[in-house]
Amino acid sequence: MPLVFAGVCSHAPGIVGRAHMADPADRASCHAAFDDMRVEIEATKPDALIVIAAEHFANFFMNNMPAFAMAMTDHYEGPIEDEVWLGIRRHRIPGHADLALRLITRVLDEVDVAYAEEWKLDHGIMVPLHFLTPRYDLPIIAVNINCQGPPLTPLHRAHAFGRVLRRACDEVPERIALIGTGGISHWPATPISGRINEAFDREFLERWSANRRDELLAYRDEDTYRNAGQGGFEIRTFIAVSGATEGLAADVLYYRAIPTFSVGCTIGIVRGLEGYDAVPQAGGRRQG
Amino acid sequence: MSLYYLQKVLFQLNRDPGVRQRFDSDFAALLDEYELTEEEREALRKPDVGLLYVLGVNGQLLMHYAALCGMPWADYIEAMREGVCRHGPVRAGLYALPDPAP
């Protein structure tokens, strides 16, 4: 059935792992925005949650780096990171191999996606799940777009992947929610970790929330690296969500540059999805 | 310079408890399985996180190695800064691209 939910959120490890070091108002507003997203996702009563993330060498390395990969497994283990460092305990997280098989089969008609029957979760998925499915009771289908090891997946291919993933979701009977996770500008794990280019982020979010395809695909990696750091390459996950929700605008519920978390923390929700029942919308805009 | 293998050691250390165990008990033999230069082996052995950064290791691998070696976050960031002061700019990999704008 038609997709019931689509949105984007940040996934920086500091959001949980360095929460105690943050300004209390930053921490509280950011975590509350994630909670608003959780409420909206739960209200759509999804059977599964697809998480399109930019992983950080949890499964894929330069020995065999897929441009796109989807998990086809009934369970995951995560996080791979140190539990104390990330602030998230290791869990076994449910997957949905049968649904993934059907989605992957459909996606393969148009995009050469790799599949993996074994998959470990890093902060790119664990941080969002920590807030969005805190009881780890919703089956997850993990998706990776290569934002780490150049040559990277081209932006227009990420968009095309989102489009076909959407068609695949529409053709199965399950109620599916979809999120993309990543940073906008950030320089994670480098000497200038904590730098955020708020102007770049706000410009990107304007293009993203209006779902202006041509403007989203106009970013060039050299410029993105210069203005938004290597973390900015993760815009691919947001662009895949745009591809999955073509023609629909989104609300940016929350944006706040929080250097302690090393990212401009973002929550965005796509409006007007056919499968999204009229549920009370939480919070409204929470600008930082 | 064999950045690929240097990063591969760290990738496998981060995700494989068996490799981590050998890192503690059988370090030299473990590293023999990778094509590493003497400088790279030394950087791993010390550990010299600053030099690993300059050699081009991706931070998404390096930050976990630093944590594994018991370095707090602030020390990790400082080690990279010091590394650039001592060894010069990053030589390879993602961060060898032109410097980000201030």
Image (cartoon, coloured by chain):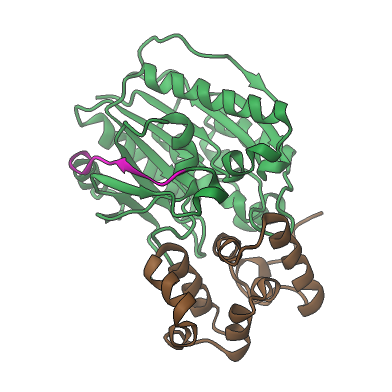
Residue A259 location, quadrant: top right
Percent position (x, y) of residue B30? 44, 83
How many numbered discs, if any?
A: 0
- Chain that the image shows in brown: B
Relative vertical location of residue B69 with respect to residue B22 in this rendering, above or below: above
Q: Observer-nearest residue: A275 or A32?
A: A32
Q: Observer-nearest residue: A62 or B37?
A: B37
Residue A139 location, quadrant: top left
Q: Observer-nearest residue: B54 or B64?
A: B64
**Quadrant where the image shows the C terminus of chain A:** top right
Does residue A249 appear in the picture of this structure? no
Percent position (x, y) of residue B18? 37, 70
Relative horizontal placement of residue A174, taking residue A12 as reference (left or right): left
Residue A175 location, quadrant: top left
The residue under the point 59% across, 44% down is A17
- Chain that the image shows in green: A
Span highlighted in magenta in the image: A89-99
The residue under the point 56% across, 60% down is B60
* Magenta-span inclusion, residue A92: yes
Does residue B85 appear in the picture of this structure? yes
Percent position (x, y) of residue A73? 24, 48
The residue under the point 49% across, 43% down is A88
Relative horizontal placement of residue A242, taking residue B74 as reference (left or right): left
Percent position (x, y) of residue A6? 42, 28
Outermost residue, front direction? Answer: B25
* Magenta-span inclusion, residue A198: no
The residue under the point 60% across, 56% down is A221
**Quadrant where the image shows the N terminus of chain A:** top left
Q: Observer-nearest residue: A42 or A130?
A: A130
